[in-house]
Image (cartoon, rainbow, N blue to C red):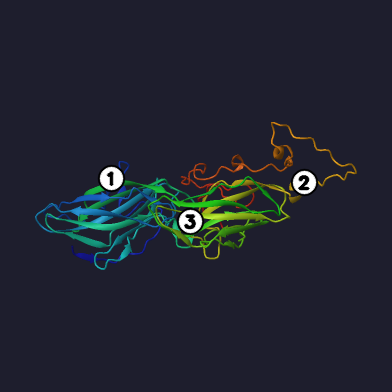
């Protein structure tokens, strides 16, 4: 296959109709009107093996498109690419790359962003494709929904799928679509959850332990990830390291007033591969000054946070888990009343073991923990992490809801 590379103007944002192509209601991609017609109309067949899905704010996923030439002469072609998604799609939300056959490097397909009844990204492969007579050429491409740029993630909207329309035309100047294909690509997301969180904790007492689970069921790898747990200002959070020791995490304060602090469970700008799950053992202790009552442990994942703006990026949050904090004094048994008379202990019944008969009953205000008291958390109760619209993220008190929006500076 011979390749000719052309220089294209950089991507720009438009608010008018697309200049590279117009998508009709029936799904047909019309290319610009022909400038000239060849004496013999060329032919081509296009086969697209698109990915089933991509990860929201994740890395691009590879796929292939094959152009076949059924004629008896070698022919050159253009490949046009267009995506359609919901109007909430912001600029820099979708990318398409191609692997340049000339040097094997991945390069961006220049795309123009347009909005009409939906959001469109459209452009043409920078390289002309020459296919031998009776043969075919397979192009390696990849598509992703990064939702912004590195360390500048946007989340002012969401979309459940992307319609990818591909069209092949001859390089003879006719710009007539010889064949085209439309594929629907789903958009999935990484998930975060807490598992086996105790329902109660004691101020100034022993820490509680549980698991923080970050799962990536998508086809995308993720980079620049911040897996965050929002806690009470009186809390100390530790994570267990590979050698079994515990490491204290630094609290980070959001810029919003009265917002709760958060800790990065795996550090800022961590990563997680496609199809993998990371489980972090966490323990949280509350100092003796913690007010009695309910507090909340709230997990969130941020992708492409700004370098100097923590907790601002493409955001996935789930409802937090409540823990009831009791005052330290409430767990202490009352001191025995002095008595000048020696107590009389009755003999145990023959049907009851002596050890049981003389056992001390725990105070009613400090029942022993049972499995039923563990908060039910995890993926089974997490709300769907992919929403077509933005939801409110309240980093301060109250529940943290699923959010996908750009937090304002």
Residue found at the far left of this picture:
72
Residue that mark 1 sits on: 28
Name above or below for residue 254 compared with residue 192.
below
Residue 54 seen in the figure: yes
Q: Residues within 10 Å of mark 2 (few under 14, many from 20)?
A: few
Residue found at the far bottom of this picture:
103
Name above or below for residue 377 compared with residue 314.
above
Tell me whether circle 2 and circle 3 mark residues in contact (CB < 8 Å): no
As rendered, which of 277 and 296 lies closer to the eye?
A: 277
As rendered, which of 83 and 372 lies closer to the eye?
A: 372
Q: Give the residue drawn at x 18%, y 62%.
A: 1
Q: Give the residue drawn at x 50%, y 42%.
A: 380
C-alpha span from label 1 to label 3:
30 Å
Residue that mark 2 sits on: 333
Q: What percent of the width, then of the height, locates residue 142?
A: 32, 57
Sequence-first disc among 1 and 3: 1
C-alpha span from label 1 to label 2:
77 Å
Q: What percent of the width, then of the height, locates residue 36?
A: 18, 56
Q: Is residue 134 left or right of residue 363?
A: left
- The numbered dot on residue 154 is 3
Q: Give the residue drawn at x 68%, y 56%.
A: 234
Q: How crowded is mark 1: few (under 14 residues within 10 Å), some or many (20 or more)?
A: some
Q: In this view, does 331 lie to the left or right of 215?
A: right
């Amino acid at each position: 296959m011979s390749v000719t590379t052309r220089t294209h103007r950089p991507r720009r944002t438009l608010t008018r109709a697309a200049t590279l192509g117009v998508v009709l209601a029936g799904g047909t991609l019309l290319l610009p009107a022909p400038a000239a017609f060849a004496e013999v109309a060329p032919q081509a067949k296009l086969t697209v093996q698109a990915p089933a899905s991509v990860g929201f704010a994740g890395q691009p996923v590879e796929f292939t498109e094959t152009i076949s030439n059924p004629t008896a002469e070698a022919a050159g072609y253009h490949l046009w690419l267009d995506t359609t998604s919901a109007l909430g799609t912001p600029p820099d939300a979708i990318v398409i790359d191609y692997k340049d056959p000339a040097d094997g490097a991945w390069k961006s397909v220049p795309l123009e962003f347009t909005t009409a009844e939906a959001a469109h990204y459209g452009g043409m492969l920078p390289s002309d494709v020459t296919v031998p007579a009776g043969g075919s050429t397979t192009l390696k491409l990849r598509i992703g929904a990064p939702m912004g740029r590195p360390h500048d993630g946007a989340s002012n909207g969401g979309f459940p799928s992307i319609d990818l329309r591909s069209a092949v035309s001859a390089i003879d100047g006719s710009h007539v679509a010889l064949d085209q294909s439309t594929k629907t690509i789903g958009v999935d997301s990484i998930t975060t959850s807490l598992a086996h969180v105790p329902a109660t904790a004691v101020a100034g007492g022993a820490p509680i332990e549980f698991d923080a689970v970050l799962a990536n069921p998508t086809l995308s790898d993720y980079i620049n990830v911040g897996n965050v747990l929002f806690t009470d200002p009186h809390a100390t959070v530790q994570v267990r390291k590979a050698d079994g020791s515990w490491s204290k995490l630094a609290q980070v304060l959001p810029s919003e007033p009265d917002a709760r602090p958060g800790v990065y469970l795996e550090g800022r700008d961590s990563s997680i591969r496609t199809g993998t799950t990371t489980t972090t053992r966490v323990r949280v202790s509350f100092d003796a000054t913690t007010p009695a009552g309910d507090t909340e442990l709230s997990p969130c994942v941020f992708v492409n946070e700004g370098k100097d703006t923590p907790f601002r990026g493409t955001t996935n949050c789930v409802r937090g888990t409540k823990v009831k904090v009791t005052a330290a004094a409430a767990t202490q048994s009352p001191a025995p009343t002095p008595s000048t008379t020696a107590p009389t202990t009755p003999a145990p019944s023959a049907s009851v073991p002596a050890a049981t008969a003389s056992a001390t009953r725990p105070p009613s205000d400090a029942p022993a923990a049972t499995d039923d008291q563990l908060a039910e958390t995890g993926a089974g109760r997490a709300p769907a992490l992919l929403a077509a619209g933005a939801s409110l993220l309240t980093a301060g008190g109250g529940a943290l809801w699923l959010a996908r929006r750009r937090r304002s500076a």
